Image (tube, rainbow, N blue to C red):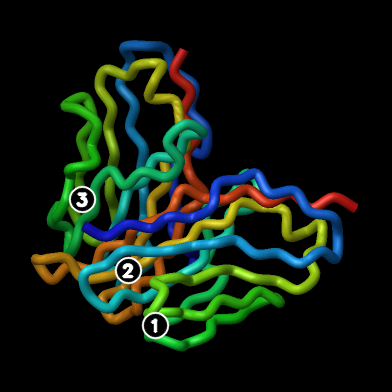
Amino acid sequence: GNSVTQMEGPVTLSEEAFLTINCTYTATGYPSLFWYVQYPGEGLQLLLKATKADDKGSNKGFEATYRKETTSFHLEKGSVQVSDSAVYFCALSDRDSGGYQKVTFGIGTKLQVIP
Amino acid sequence: DAGVIQSPRHEVTEMGQEVTLRCKPISGHDYLFWYRQTMMRGLELLIYFNNNVPIDDSGMPEDRFSAKMPNASFSTLKIQPSEPRDSAVYFCASKGQGSSGELFFGEGSRLTVL
């Protein structure tokens, strides 16, 4: 079956540091890939997505590139802010054997940015 | 659109009591998902529906859990009887058929079973 593996946190960075959160996936088909963000006390919300190989998703200074050859979708940001402190989830969407679209999430990586 | 609406936002109950969580998906969305989030296990898919029909309930932990979707605008997740280990945040999410897979989440229902 499909699976998503992401680095476990927590990750603690100083403000303006460079961020990388690794994510790799296993899928039988051609999935779409996503990063979701969860701020304290809230539900998950979409941060960025990529639907095919070599696509780059970007939003709010975050970027991730769909790498089919390495089955990866690493999240990066050049300069993090305190307001980026949240939990980040990597996810993939693919159709199962019945043709239904199923979404699989990674375990989530907590990011804490200190001033 | 108002987004995915869940109720209650917080529920505190005693062991053995019945708990019912409610979800209203985004109008026009034909997939609905129930997730449970805990510190130990992260985000777990419990069950999902397509066009009101349960497709995969393999994530439902045991017979104490049940979920229904009587129409396109309403779903419930019921726990009977509840146990302390059921304490978690329960999320509902919905998705449109034509989307690339993006889910829209509600704000969650935080359940505490004493």
Residue B16 locus on image (x, y percent): 31, 12
Q: Residue at x 45, y 57 (%)?
A: B105
Rendered image: mark on residue A93 = 2
Density class for disc 1 (Cα within 10 Å; few <14, some 14-19, many ≥20) is: some
Three-letter residue code for mark 1: Thr
Which residue occupies the foreground of this view, B34 or A12? Answer: A12
Gap in angstroms between the C-alphas marked 3 and 2: 22 Å
Residue B49 placement: quadrant: bottom left
Three-letter residue code for mark 2: Ser
Residue highlighted by disc 3: B69
Numbered disc 3: what chain?
A: B
Residue A45 locus on image (x, y percent): 53, 62
Task: Report the mark closest to the observer, 1 or 3.
Answer: 1
Figure check: B105 above or below B87: below
Residue B34 locus on image (x, y percent): 32, 48
Extreme residue in the right direction: A115
Secondary structure type for disc 3 = strand
Residue A94 placement: quadrant: bottom left
Extreme residue in the front direction: A70
Mark nearer the N terminus (1 vs 2): 1
